[in-house]
């Protein structure tokens, strides 16, 4: 069981979001270092990040191609940070990336190409590096060999067969671990130096990543600020973990979530739910071996993060599963269950391994979750674990998490009693994580203003049932939020636009709650309505949000700099 700690305040800041003078179009470790200093100055106890594992050509940080490798896109590319680069190299890249650096959102293709080009250049000069630097790299290779060798081989195979192709699309000669290793041996026989050079490049990049992130962790610790990481429930089907360790996964089942009414505009999501495309774990085999894959994953994570959030922790008990990969979703979007079963050998999406439909099944799912989560806690050691326990939550989950000392989420306007009233913050469980929104939702101001428009624009007169239903839902959401914050309902029935006064009222009430952790998204802190991700959608709007300003610009602007001052005051008043 985790020990309880002091109540702390945090800010959710995705690694891709902060700006700094001289960055290459995306947040990086130097930008995060600036925010750590800001957090320490303003009494913020932790910075919450999204997953930082490498996700290859995918943009979602929840589609990692490795459970351990860090995405090099977050590397701070400076001559002082990357051995072998000159200031001129970086300046030229910055000049070529001018539009991407100034853009409102991250331009992933342009940024990846620029950073990859500079890293290739640095590697080409690495033989000229100081002996002490080369020795440090050699130690990293030796100490991390248990995962690094497979990762480097997988990255080379991706490079040679096409970054956008999944491993089942590779030539037959490379589709199994045995065949792939034979292929690599053949390539070595033809040109050993060339193969060693490419394998070395990927190891070099990971050395740089771990070097910078470990230094960031040390800096945060010196400042009294904790970094909070994120462990996705799954790993990409196209990952080195699945490719080389496929006996630990069900490759014919993909994890996801059941259908929800909120996706009424999408026929597939409304009929079937979200198909995340992550292969399911063979938990029984992992347990028989003592969960070595999970233990290694968590241990590496705790080298950087003192707190980490377990995404979709419900999946440790049972998970909604699809018997097809997302590439086939369109085939089933407009089918009913009988038609889908006929198309798919009788198999349909279901709860895996079993639903919570009987007391016996609930008890079995609870036992499974207990064994698996205790292994996670053991690997985490003294580090703190948070549970993302949102969605279809079985009644046994939250009491069990509390008994383990794992703090679950409390979203005030969702945690209502049978009469529809929100639970007051002073009654939140101590072992909980209070927040208004996650990266998958609108920030608080966006929620309030969308509901305010829906309620006020018709003045009680609706042209159809759908409009009336939407207005009723929006009215309920506003009343719930307002009640939690102690904001009275307006006498004329017309709710005000979200204002600075309303914003800070909400922040103070959240931080005054009894929860061990209370966190705001950085968008909420600055009154922005930008959204980080819209589940079930694709396109250039997801995972690309960047703050409009650098911290230097924030500190130079009286209105923006006052945000930190107000936040520090509230943290002090609420004793976080």
Image (cartoon, rainbow, N blue to C red):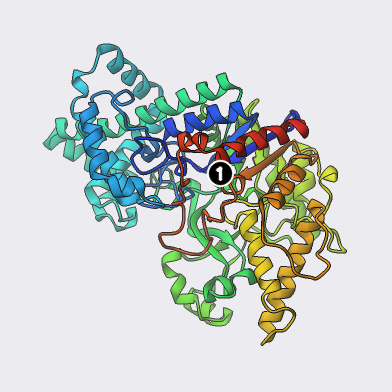
Query: Residue 449's image quarter?
Result: bottom right
Left or right of 503 on screen, residue 60: left
Q: Position of residue 16 (x, y in %)?
A: 44, 43
Q: Residue at x 37, y 40 (%)?
A: 73
* Residue 264 vertical placement versus 358 (above, below): below
Outermost residue toward the right? Answer: 419
The image shows residue 256 at horizontal and vertical percentages of 56, 60
On the question of residue 308 being in view, the answer is no
- Judge left or right: residue 444 versus residue 269: right
Other-residue count near label 1 (Cα within 10 Å), few / some / many at <14 / 14–19 / ≥20: few
Query: What is the total number of numbered labels drawn onto the structure image?
Result: 1
**Residue 168, image x and y in percent?**
33, 56
Quarter of the picture containing the C terminus is: top right
Q: Secondary structure at mark 1?
A: helix
Question: Which quadrant is home to the N terminus?
Answer: top right
- Residue 257 visible in rendering: yes
Q: Nearer the viewer, residue 286 or 218?
A: 218
79 relative to 459, above or below: above
Q: Residue furthest front?
A: 558
> Most extreme residue toward the bottom, as rendered?
463
Residue placed furthest toward the top: 132
Residue 169, given in percent of the width and then of the height, sits at: 30, 58
Residue annotated with mark 1? 285
Q: Nearer the viewer, residue 113 or 92?
A: 92
Residue at 45% from the left image edge and 38% from the top image edge: 550
In front here: 223 or 373?
A: 223
State the image quarter where residue 361 is shown: bottom right
């Amino acid at each position: 069981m985790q020990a309880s700690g002091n109540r702390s305040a945090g800010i959710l800041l995705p690694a891709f979001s902060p700006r700094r003078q001289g960055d290459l179009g995306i947040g990086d470790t130097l930008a995060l270092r600036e925010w750590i200093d800001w957090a320490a100055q303003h009494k913020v106890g932790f910075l919450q990040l999204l997953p930082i594992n490498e996700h290859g050509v995918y943009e979602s940080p929840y589609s990692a191609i490795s459970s351990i490798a860090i995405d090099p896109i977050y590397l701070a590319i400076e001559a002082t940070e990357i051995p072998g680069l000159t200031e001129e190299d970086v300046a030229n890249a910055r000049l070529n990336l001018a539009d991407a650096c100034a853009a409102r959102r991250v331009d992933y293709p342009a940024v990846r190409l620029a950073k990859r080009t500079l890293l290739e250049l640095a590697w080409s000069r690495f033989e000229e590096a100081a002996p002490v630097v080369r020795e440090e790299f050699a130690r990293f290779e030796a100490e991390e060999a248990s995962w690094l060798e497979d990762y480097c081989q997988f990255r080379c195979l991706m490079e040679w067969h096409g970054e956008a192709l999944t491993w089942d699309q590779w030539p037959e000669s490379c589709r199994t671990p045995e065949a792939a290793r034979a292929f690599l041996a053949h390539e070595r026989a033809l040109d050993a130096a060339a193969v060693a050079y490419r394998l070395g490049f990927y190891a070099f990049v990971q050395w740089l990543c771990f070097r910078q992130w470990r230094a960031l962790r040390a800096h945060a610790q010196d400042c009294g600020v904790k970094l909070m990481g994120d462990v996705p429930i799954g790993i990409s089907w196209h990952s080195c973990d699945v490719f080389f360790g496929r006996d630990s996964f069900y490759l014919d089942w993909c994890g996801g979530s059941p259908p929800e009414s909120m996706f009424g505009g999408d026929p597939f999501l409304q009929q079937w739910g979200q198909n995340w495309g992550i292969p399911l774990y063979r938990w029984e085999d992992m347990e028989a071996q003592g969960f070595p894959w999970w233990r290694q994953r968590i241990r590496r994570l705790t080298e950087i993060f003192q707190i980490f959030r377990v995404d979709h922790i419900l999946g440790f008990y049972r998970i909604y599963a699809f018997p097809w990969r997302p590439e086939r979703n369109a085939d089933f979007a407009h089918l009913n269950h009988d038609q889908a079963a006929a198309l798919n050998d009788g198999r349909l999406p279901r709860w895996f391994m079993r639903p919570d439909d009987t007391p016996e099944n609930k008890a079995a799912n609870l036992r499974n979750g207990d064994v698996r989560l205790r292994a996670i806690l053991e690997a985490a050691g003294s580090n703190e674990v948070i549970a993302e326990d949102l969605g279809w939550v079985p009644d046994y989950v939250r009491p069990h998490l509390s008994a383990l000392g794992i703090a679950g989420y409390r979203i005030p306007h969702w945690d209502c009693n049978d009469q529809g009233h929100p639970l007051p913050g002073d009654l939140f469980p101590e072992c909980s994580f209070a927040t208004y929104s996650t990266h998958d939702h609108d920030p608080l101001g966006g929620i309030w203003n969308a509901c305010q428009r829906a309620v006020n624009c018709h003045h009680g007169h609706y042209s159809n049932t759908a409009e009336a239903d939407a207005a009723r839902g929006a009215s309920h959401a506003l009343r719930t939020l307002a009640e939690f914050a102690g904001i009275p309902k307006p006498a004329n029935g017309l709710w005000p636009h979200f204002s600075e006064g309303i914003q800070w009222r909400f922040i103070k009430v959240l931080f005054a709650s009894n929860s061990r952790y209370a966190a705001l998204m950085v968008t909420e802190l600055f009154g922005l309505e930008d959204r980080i991700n819209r589940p079930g959608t694709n396109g250039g709007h997801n995972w690309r949000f960047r703050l409009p300003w650098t911290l230097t610009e924030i500190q130079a602007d009286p209105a923006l700099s006052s945000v930190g001052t107000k936040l520090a005051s509230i943290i002090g008043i609420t004793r976080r």
